[in-house]
Amino acid sequence: MPEYNLLGHPKKLKRDVGIRLNDKEHNRALAMKFDFEYFDGSREQGYGGYKYDGRWVAVAERLKDRYKLREGSCFLDVGCAKGFLMHDLTTICPGASIHGLDISLYAKNHALASVKENIDIGNCLKLPYEDNAFDAAVAINTIHNLELDDCKKSIRELMRVTKNKKNIFIQVDAYSDKRELEMFQAWVLTAQTYMMPDEWENIFKEIGYEGDYFWTIIGFEGN
Ligand SMILES: C[S@@+](CC[C@H](N)C(=O)[O-])C[C@H]1O[C@@H](n2cnc3c(N)ncnc32)[C@H](O)[C@@H]1O
């Protein structure tokens, strides 16, 4: 069950947290609909434009190597949004069957044409797939959008649908100290569950999760 930096993130993501301090509750409510505002509205309400820019190519290459994906492999991205990782994995792993699931119909409707048909609308809490249906699965910054009990259910679901329980990657929001918690709370819009890395690790142990994991930790410009 190793910590693994699949996305190649720096230890802390630098964010201009000041812009999220005003109208927080209004912006949170809009973001949590996972609709236009969250993906393509202003930075105060979400991504400020969730656009394909090629950054997932390196992630797809690491995924392919780590989980030995090849022709005939079956892969699932839970919380796939507009399918950017799916698109790059499709190119890097020809002949693999690449699937995604997201709660957002807006994201699917604005997904890359190459993968749109392979995106299912659903909830990570209850995945609409058979046991052991996939060779590998990821949930990148997705499950922390649920309350803790539902996060646990989502992790169990990832384990249920993945054949080799080690071929799973989960990235979640975390903080290592009081200052990072303050930064996080200033920035956060949709996460319901965030903890220190060792607290997340205790949850993983409690569930018997054997896959990989990593943290999204927010810093601020100049820190
Ligand atoms: C922070 S975005 C991450 C998107 C993508 N994985 C990435 O890293 O760029 C979170 C994604 O999870 C989706 N999401 C939120 N709650 C979900 C749920 N309960 N089940 C499935 N998807 C969910 C959102 O619609 C959004 O696409």
Image (spheres, rainbow, N blue to C red):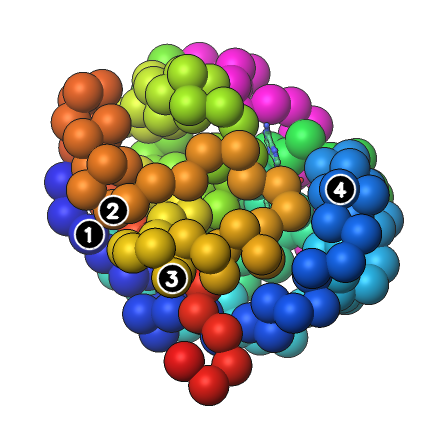
Q: Which residue is mark 1?
A: 3
What kind of residue is marked 2? Answer: Pro
Q: Which label's residue is closer to the chain start, 4 or 2?
A: 4
Task: Tell me: residue 72, above or below residue 48.
Answer: above
Q: Give the extent of the magenta segment.
A: 112-130
Kindly indicate the quadrant of the structure image that contains residue 50. Answer: bottom right
**Mark 4 C-beta closer than 8 Å to ligand 1:** no
Mark 3 or mark 4: name the one nearer the start of the chain: 4
Label 1 – label 3 distance at C-alpha:
22 Å
Q: Residue flagged by tag 4: what amino acid is it?
A: Glu
Q: Is mark 3 within 8 Å of ligand 1?
A: no
C-alpha gap between disc 3 and disc 4: 21 Å
Amino acid type of the residue that numbered disc 1 sits on in the rendered structure = Glu
Instruction: Say whether residue 132 is left or right of residue 139.
Output: left
Q: Using the rendered image of the protein, determine whether residue 137 is visible from the camera's viewpoint.
A: yes
The numbered mark, 3 or 2, whose residue comes first in the sequence reads 3
Q: Which residue is mark 4?
A: 25
State which mark lies toward you, 4 or 2: 4
